[in-house]
Amino acid sequence: MRLLQILALLTTIAWLLACGKQEASKTTEQQNLQGQISKEVSDPKLARGKAVYDETGCATCHMVAGIGGRTGPSLDGIGKKYDAEKLKEILLNPKTLNPNTVMPPFEGSDEDLDALVDYLLSLK
């Protein structure tokens, strides 16, 4: 009986250590993505696009580099998936991509839409 308790304890410790390592690697990966985003946002147009992203509440539903909501899809890698024309189409009429989406259409200026698209394209 004592041997089973010791084995259970050792198994639990090993599991906790493994989970801690996975969490540490996730954190490092998220930090790398956030660092990449910070560098990209140093461009004034991308900075404006990031500001539009923040101001319109995109992060309420979408995640970038581990930050944001989970209602909508993560936007990590979106710049590899779609071109500027398709992103504009999705932003202006989200139901073209997903008829059941709750995402509202973008209602800002053309300049803000262009800046937002440039920011999203930078998320590769």
Image (cartoon, helix red, strand yellow):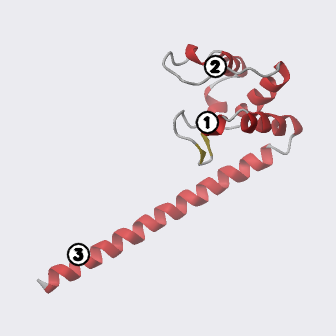
- Amino acid residing under circle 3: Ala
In the displayed structure, does residue 4 sit left or right of residue 28? left
Q: Do the residues labelled 3 and 1 touch (CB within 8 Å)?
A: no
Picture coordinates of residue 73, whole percent (x, y):
54, 34
**Picture quarter containing residue 102?**
top right
Residue 7 image position (x, y, % from top left): 22, 78
Task: Find the distance from the CA under tag 3 to the CA under tag 1.
Answer: 41 Å
Q: What element carries label 1?
A: loop
Separation of marks 3 and 2 at Cα, in angstroms: 52 Å
Question: Is residue 123 depicted above or below 110 in this figure?
Answer: below
> Label 1 belongs to which residue?
75
Describe residue 20's horizontal placement relative to residue 62 as left or right.
Answer: left
Estimate the x, y position of residue 71 in percent, counting from the top left. 52, 35
Tell me the crowding category of disc 3: few under 14, some 14 to 19, or many 20 or more residues within 10 angstroms, Cα based.
few
Vertical order, 21 against 10 (above or below): above
Residue at the spot of label 2 = 90
